[in-house]
Amino acid sequence: MSSQFEIEQYIHAIPDFPEPGVVFRDLSPLFANPKALRICIDRYLERYIDWDLDAVVAIDARGFIVGSILAWELKKPLIMVRKAGKLPGECEQASYSMEYGSRTVEMQKASLKAGDNILLFDDLLATGGTVMAATTLITSLGAKVAEVAALVDLPDLGGSSKLTSAGISTFSLVAYAES
């Protein structure tokens, strides 16, 4: 693939899914194309290879796909943020609101230690609720979020600006305006 490769061709816009008025960004074609996924991973590696990171924290579920590859390539542990009730052992929980309810995510308490420097990865940054909850989990365990990385940013939904306002750096490979 050329150096002018654009991942947008592998991210499909599905209108009115999962409900009317929502444009769903389907990453399945990207994940199904090994060359396209490799190029995405290489772009992240170019950015993070020299960072002083202790772990990659990935968010359930599509964040696990790229997050686990990044952790492997960076030779760092992968720590999972999952929906409540999905992890064994003692867990820390954080809840967040959405326009149609609330959700709770959790992380095992023993997964991080004070002072750890974390790369937090999710597939898509929209309103920032899940990422802010994950950041709360990370900081409650004494660790620090070095940066939030995502494949896609939807800046019109405010998540990246919410994180920036909270002093958290973000990086994505592509951004889509929703309007």
Image: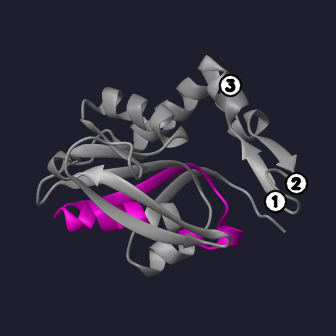
SS at mark 2 in the image: loop
Q: Residue furthest left?
A: 114
Which of pointers 1 and 3 lies earlier in the amino acid sequence?
A: 3
Report the amino acid beneath label 2: Asp
Report the residue marked by disc 2: 16
Query: Start and end of the magenta stretch?
Result: 133-160
Report the residue marked by disc 3: 2
Report the residue marked by disc 1: 22
Label 2 neighbour load within 10 Å: few <14, some 14-19, many 20+ = few
Report the amino acid beneath label 1: Val
Residue 155: assigned label: none
Percent x, y of residue 153: 62, 57
SS at mark 3 in the image: loop
**Left or right for 12, reference 87:** right
**Quadrant of the drawing holding the C terminus:** bottom right
Say which quarter of the image contains residue 74.
top left
